[in-house]
Image (tube, rainbow, N blue to C red):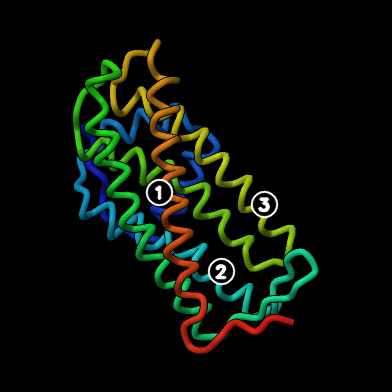
């Protein structure tokens, strides 16, 4: 099995993300064979990349002011924006692990092989496109659309990597993916509810 060699963390992240986005199939083969740990992936991959949309989103909201919805302008407090970013970041770290646990638990049902580490690698690495696309949240309205499209590409990466890392039956991969998608959407909805509850921290949201 291949072992990830030490080096510049930023260089490794950039090189791996570029290869995964541009050459997903062979890169998934490399990832499947790598010997690593969940802790190492958290420190060297998930933690830095998951911070991108949190930081960019907060900076974008602070820079471009209030949000307008159906003609009503909402102006949350600075503390509320920063708190939402921090809570969203922490929940993302938790969601990655929860998603990996679910994938691992479902593996045998779809003809796959159970491996918590492989499931975590699948969730962590497939998320790179969406996390990198979070930088577009620095921009006004079009940035949200671009970030969404990056998230869709992460789903495509997940679909390609699913049979390679979890060794699922090729005829059941689509069903396995659909089940994972339902779980992912549920987690995203829960995260949205929890982060929205922190928007009023530091003072009321101004509406005008």
Tell which circle, 2 or 3, labels the residue nearer the N-terminal end.
2
Q: Residue at x 33, y 14 (%)?
A: 169
Instruction: Give how far across and how far down residue 58 sits, in percent.
Output: 55, 74
Q: Which residue is mark 3?
A: 146
Q: Is residue 49 left or right of residue 205?
A: left
- Marks 3 and 1, how far apart in space? 21 Å
Residue under label 1, please give it: 187
| For the residues bearing labels 2 and 3, Cβ distance under 8 angstroms | no
Distance between the alpha carbons at the discs numbered 2 and 3: 13 Å
Which residue is the extreme one toward the top?
171
Q: Secondary structure at mark 3?
A: helix
- Quarter of the picture containing the C terminus is bottom right
Q: Residue at x 46, y 48 (%)?
A: 128
Residue 45's tag is: none
Viewer-nearest residue: 56 or 73: 73
> Which tag, 3 or 1, sits closer to the chain's start?
3
Q: Decide which of tag 1 and tag 2 comes sooner along the chain.
A: 2
Task: List x then y, in percent, for residue 180.
Answer: 39, 33
Helix, strand or loop at mark 2: helix
Q: Give how far across and how far down residue 100 sits, in percent.
A: 28, 41
Q: Residue furthest bottom?
A: 203
Q: Neighbour class for label 2 at 10 Å: few (<14), some, many (≥20)?
A: some
Q: Residues within 10 Å of mark 3 (few under 14, many from 20)?
A: some
Mark in the foreground, 3 or 1: 1
Q: Position of residue 71 (x, y in %)?
A: 80, 69
Q: Is residue 37 left or right of residue 159?
A: left
At a point 61% along the width and 53% down the height, the residue shown is 147
Look at the numbered discs 3 and 1 and tell me whether their residues touch, using CB distance below 8 Å.
no
Q: Quadrant of the N terminus?
A: top left
């Amino acid at each position: 099995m291949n072992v990830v060699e030490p080096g510049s963390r930023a260089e490794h992240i950039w090189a791996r993300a570029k290869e995964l986005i541009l050459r997903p199939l062979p890169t998934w083969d490399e990832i499947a064979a790598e010997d690593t740990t969940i802790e190492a992936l958290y420190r060297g991959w998930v933690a830095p990349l998951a911070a991108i949309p949190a930081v960019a989103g907060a900076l974008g909201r602070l820079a471009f002011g209030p949000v307008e919805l159906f003609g009503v302008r909402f102006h949350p407090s600075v503390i509320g924006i920063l708190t939402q970013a921090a809570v969203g970041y922490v929940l993302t770290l938790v969601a990655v692990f929860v998603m990996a646990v679910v994938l691992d638990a479902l593996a045998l049902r779809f003809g796959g092989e159970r491996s918590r580490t492989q499931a975590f690698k699948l969730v962590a690495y497939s998320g790179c496109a969406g996390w990198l696309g979070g930088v577009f949240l620095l921009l006004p309205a079009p940035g949200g659309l671009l970030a969404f499209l990056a998230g869709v590409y992460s789903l495509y990466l997940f679909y390609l990597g699913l049979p390679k890392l979890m060794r699922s039956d090729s005829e059941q991969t689509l069903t396995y993916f659909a089940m994972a998608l339902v779980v992912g959407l549920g987690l995203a909805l829960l995260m949205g509810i929890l982060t929205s509850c922190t928007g009023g921290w530091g003072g009321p949201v101004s509406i005008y």
